Amino acid sequence: MSSVDQVLSVLERRLDQTLEELIEFARIPSVSADGFDPHQVERSAEHSAQLLGKAGLEGVEVLRLPGAHPYVVGEWLRAGVEAPTVLIYAHHDVQPPGRPERWETPEFEPTLRADGRLYGRGVADDKAGLMVHLAAVRAWLEATSSLPVNVKLVVDGEEEIDSPHLTEFLRTHHDRLAAEVIVLSDTANLQKGLPSLTTSLRGLVAVDVTVRVLRYPVHSGLWGGPVADAAAALVRLLARLVDDRGVITVPGIYADVPELAAEERARLAALPFDEGAFRADVGLLSTTELAGEPERSVYERLWLRPSLSVTALEGIPLATASNQLTDEARARVGVRLAPGQDPARVRDLLVSCLRSDPPWGAEVTTEVRAAVPGWRIDPLGPAFDAARRALAAGFERDPVAIGCGGTIPFVGPFSEVLGHAPALLLGLEDPVCNAHGENESLDLDDFRKAARVSVHLLAELRKALTR
């Protein structure tokens, strides 16, 4: 029996224990967003540190920066100077739970269901991402008393609020985190059971817009007609941003979107796609049409073209509504940028569009919440070859290269600060996991396969990168 086989045997034997550890971990409501208890993020960091130590990592610490949620680090550096050093990234914070009434089981009481999935906030994004690597490290150390590579692990406490302090953290602890390759476990597979290597991410511009027309609310019957209300003004303003197809109409926004080469379009076309399954996975109503540029494929629209969404909308809540014209209404407008677009340019275009010629002369103010670029890499070289071999071995199926429509702001800076180390984006979410939504879930079979991938990845990186 090879050493890898011995490690996999230990991994399988301890899988139930790993799952129980994930369930205990996910019970901590570590929401990093404003308005939630920061003590829970502290609890989660301390629990993460315990898990790192339990797996056999050394030098485990909870590290803090002023004003930041805590980070956790650990390492195992006994593989020798000839072995490569791998930096593994995950995060222990989670999204807010959303609407409690939409959860079929309590959001912070992870629940196994008959469909083979574990339900709860954070079980997929990203506490499982951490647990698969810890399971692999523990299995290697138990089976062989060593790891094939030097390993460093950093667990972020602010990823779900766009990691505002991560670049500062990396620069502060640069020497401690130096590595030849980065493994980030916070992405998804194209389909359940289909291992996927993410090679592009969209960027993000987010702008809050406030519309005011009155000094205070007034009676809609006594004043409605000659007097406009802020909610109607905001709706008209937002409606200018997209056309009837859902294509963005902000002037100039597509000018710097890179066009795909013929071979890139061919690679997208070769990926499996079933519109019926896509619609079912996202929960589209039967009458809802697909939005965006119809001449472009769904994957191109999803990964490599900009999109615009209204991600928050505030006026007068229905529960407290009365017959009045509201004085103020607010919204958050988010633009996902194509990789290669300039976020500063898109930010300025969006702000200008929102503030130009407001309906009925309303007062419009804006606040930029985010302006971060996308990321893209050509997955060539020994580290990417090692990742593909590990994915194929863990899932027993050839992997595919995909994009991601979401944004992980730190991937580019992460790689840059660490000397442009190759970044391997491997995840275990799937299209129906509903990360960030209610009833977030994790497929347990993919969880097992992802842990196997991590075992193989350490071995494959040793073979590919040993000096």
Image (cartoon, helix red, strand yellow):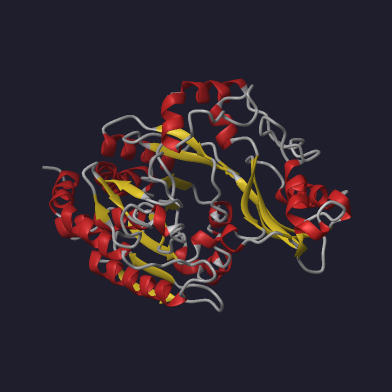
Against 63, residue 404 (above or below) is above
**Residue 271: in sight, yes or no?**
no
Against 361, residue 75 (above or below) is below
Q: Residue 342: give x, y in percent of width and height.
A: 72, 46
Is 245 left, or right, of 285 in this rendering?
Answer: right
Is 189 left, or right, of 33 in this rendering?
Answer: left
Quadrant in the picture for residue 260: top right
Task: Looking at the picture, tell me which residue is in the foreground, 94 or 363.
Answer: 363
Q: Residue 246: give x, y in percent of width and height.
A: 66, 34
Quadrant in the picture for residue 27: bottom left
Against 72, residue 121 (above or below) is above
Looking at the image, the residue that sits furthest to the left is 1
Residue plotted at (46% across, 57% down): 98
Q: Name the quadrant of the N terminus.
A: top left
Task: Looking at the picture, tell me which residue is in the foreground, 25 or 2.
Answer: 25
Is 368 left, or right, of 397 in this rendering?
Answer: right
Q: Residue 298: give x, y in percent of width and height.
A: 55, 28
Is 348 left, or right, of 372 in this rendering?
Answer: right
Q: Residue 158: give x, y in percent of width and height.
A: 50, 65
Residue plotted at (55% across, 56% down): 410
**Residue 117: in sight, yes or no?**
yes
Quadrant in the picture for residue 145: bottom left
Residue plotted at (46% across, 75% down): 38
